[in-house]
Image (cartoon, rainbow, N blue to C red):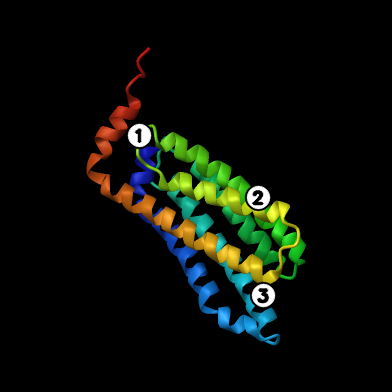
Amino acid sequence: MIRVLICNWWLLALRGVFALVFAVLVFSLRSLETSIFTRPIVHTGLVVIFGLLALAAGVSTVAAAVYRAGKDKSHLLLWDGIAVCTAGLVILLAPKMELASFVYLVAVWAIVVGILELVTARALRRHIPDEWSLSLAGLGSLILGAYFLFERSVQGATMIRWLGVYSAFSAVAMLALAFRLYGLRSSIHQLVEGAELPSPK
């Protein structure tokens, strides 16, 4: 798995960029939420943009899992990308879904992605013991999912702000991971050889 991640660090960075774009949009459009005329348009537009960027982020993650992978495919990363793609597609195919349904969808998606990211982070730490960014991304996903799942009174504006904060947090964590992997390109052979050594009994 470590070879796949290092070779495809830029695809993970792209996922971080997509998350950062959404966070910037959320906070740059906050002034339009004060008007009752523009608020519904802003919220609907941000939901659609979230779906588009989620789909793009999922595609980049799937690509990172399979591109130049050979027999070394990262199945956890693949399922992570599929989960993000699925959420994006559902949002785009049903843009007029009720707020409660959207909140529930995002909650389930975030919990699934959080679990996959934490499991992937645990596997990654066998090669890079001090790597923490993916663990933080997974933890952030779980917190968002739990909040949306158990806080049934989430309003549209609150939900959008939470998504913006989560996207910014996820972007920083994913970009930190991507550039850490970029810095390990010269050590890829040692890391791969160390992963292939039999563990001592």
Residue situated in front as seen by the camera: 53 or 175 = 175
**At 46% from the left edge and 51% from the top edge, which residue is drawn?**
63
The answer to whether mark 2 and mark 1 are in CB contact below 8 A is: no
From mark 2 to mark 3, how far is it between C-alphas?
A: 23 Å
* Residue corresponding to mark 1: 127
Three-letter amino acid code at the position of disc 2: Ala
Q: Earlier in the sequence, mark 3 or mark 1?
A: 3
The location of residue 110, given as percent across then percent down, is: 61, 51
Q: Secondary structure at mark 3?
A: helix
**At 36% from the left edge and 55% from the top edge, which residue is drawn?**
10
From mark 3 to mark 1, how far is it between C-alphas?
A: 43 Å
* Residue corresponding to mark 2: 146
The answer to whether mark 2 and mark 3 are in CB contact below 8 A is: no
Three-letter amino acid code at the position of disc 3: Thr
**At 46% from the left edge and 65% from the top edge, which residue is drawn?**
20
Q: Which mark is residue 44?
A: 3
